[in-house]
Structures are given as C-alpha cells and as structure tokens.
Amino acid sequence: MDGRAVELWTPPYFARDVRKPAAKMFSHTSKLNLPGDQGLQKLIEGNQRFERGQAQFHSVCKETLADLAKGQHPFATILGCSDSRVPPELIFDANFGELFIVRVAGNVISPEVMGSLQYAENHLRTPLFVVLGHEGCGAVKAALESKLGGIEHRSRIQTLVDNILPGLLDVSSQASEEEQLTTAVEANVRWSIHQISETAEGQNAMKAGIRLMGAIYEIASGHVRFLP
C-alpha cells in the first residue's frame, strides 16, 4: 500500500458546505455504461434478491479459494457502519471477492478510512464507491444527543461523535425525534461523501470516471435506497 495514503487523503474537516445535492457534486459521474454504473446495477439487483428473500448466500469451494488467494478484484468499495444488522455482503447478495468493505461506527471519515479508500482506488481499481448509512444508526443518534441535548459521551465515543457533528447543521430541534434521526442519518452520509470529494485525490478519481454514491439501508424492509 502507498505509504503516503493517509497523508494524501486526510479529510478537510474545515469544509462546511455539505448541503449540495450529491447529483450536483458528482454530476460528471452520470455518464452511462461506465464500469461504475454496471457495478451499481449489480448492487441494486443483489439487494432486490435479498429483499425478496431470494439471496443466494454463496458458499465457496476449494477451487474458488485457491483463485481468490491469487488476488482480489472487487467491483465496488463500500464504506459502511459497524452495526451488526448491516452486513454489506449479505444485503447486496455479493460473492467472495466482489466487495471491498470498510466498516466503522457511523460510517465516519478518518485518516485510516481515507487510506483504505485510496488503497481501493489506487491498487484495486474499484470503479464504484458507496457510502452506506442505515436507519436508526446509534452513532448518529449519539451525535444528535450531543448537538441537541448537550450530552458529553465517553472519550473515544465523543471523538467519533465529533466527526459526525459538522454534517448535522440542518437538523431541526423542532422536528420529532424520529424525523431528526432520519434527517441526520442521510446528512451524515452526505457529509462523508463531501469529505471524500473535497480531497484532490477524490476529485481526480471522479474525473477519471469513478462513481461515488450515497445510500441508506432500511433495516425493517432490507431495502437499500440510493441517494440522488
């Protein structure tokens, strides 16, 4: 792995304009028939199988393991939450070696996460990156408790929360708790996307045709909703 990855992809935490629609920030990714679009279609179809209860839940034979030992060629990179109810391989009905997955509570951005994403782009050449949030995210809920209730969490959890807070500028204190969390979960996905897109490396990758998407997993239904 490139030893400069963490340095190059250190996120600009001063960036504040996270309210741009994703379609505007990444309009150049809308071209048809790019590898990223094909990967997105595979994710959609896999999630549809999962939602219908027709997921294949792939087993693996020795021959497949031997082939995977030679290297990996994932078609998508997923930055998701650590929540045990949101395993990307299962909800996208993906096989071994198809997804490169980075999981951290609240799908937050950190230098280590950025280094992992840069590895996926530079070395694995995945054409599609998806930031996957989910309904009822505990990390986002903790951030709301700090933002709206002034609650101070234990030290390491507060560090995590502090990474989420800049993306929650538009969450209204007048909304219901359910509406606040729903809004905040989506805002947090867009905040992670924004931080990736603000790096020079992220911008260059997208100019080269790599697609960056946000999505929300609906735990009760199993459906993945991709953000516009």
Image (spheres, rainbow, N blue to C red):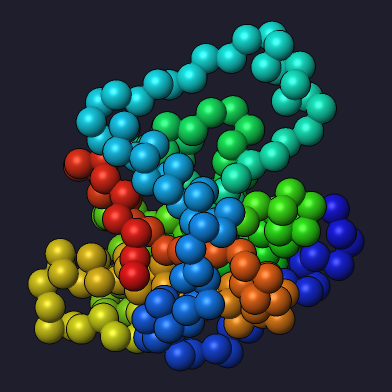
The location of residue 204, given as percent across then percent down, is 70, 76
Horizontal arrangement in the rendering, residue 211 relative to residue 215 (left or right): right
Q: Residue at x 81, y 27 (%)?
A: 70
Residue 131 seen in this snapshot: yes
Residue shown at the point (71%, 81%) measured from the top left = 200
Q: Position of residue 29 (x, y in %)?
A: 52, 71
Name above or below for residue 91 compared with residue 154: above
For the point 67% across and 59% down, the residue is: 117
How many discs appear? 0
Percent x, y of residue 176: 10, 72
Asked whether, in this view, residue 8 is left or right of residue 207, the answer is right
Horizontally, residue 64 falls left or right of residue 82, namely right
Give the image location of residue 47, x and y in percent: 35, 40
Q: Which residue occupies the extreme top position in the image?
A: 62
Q: Residue at x 23, y 31 (%)?
A: 52
> The C terminus lies in which quarter of the figure?
bottom left
Query: Closer to the camera, 131 or 227?
Result: 227
* Location of residue 71 with respect to 185 vertically, above or below: above
Residue 174 quadrant: bottom left
Q: Is residue 128 visible?
A: no
Residue found farthest to the front: 33
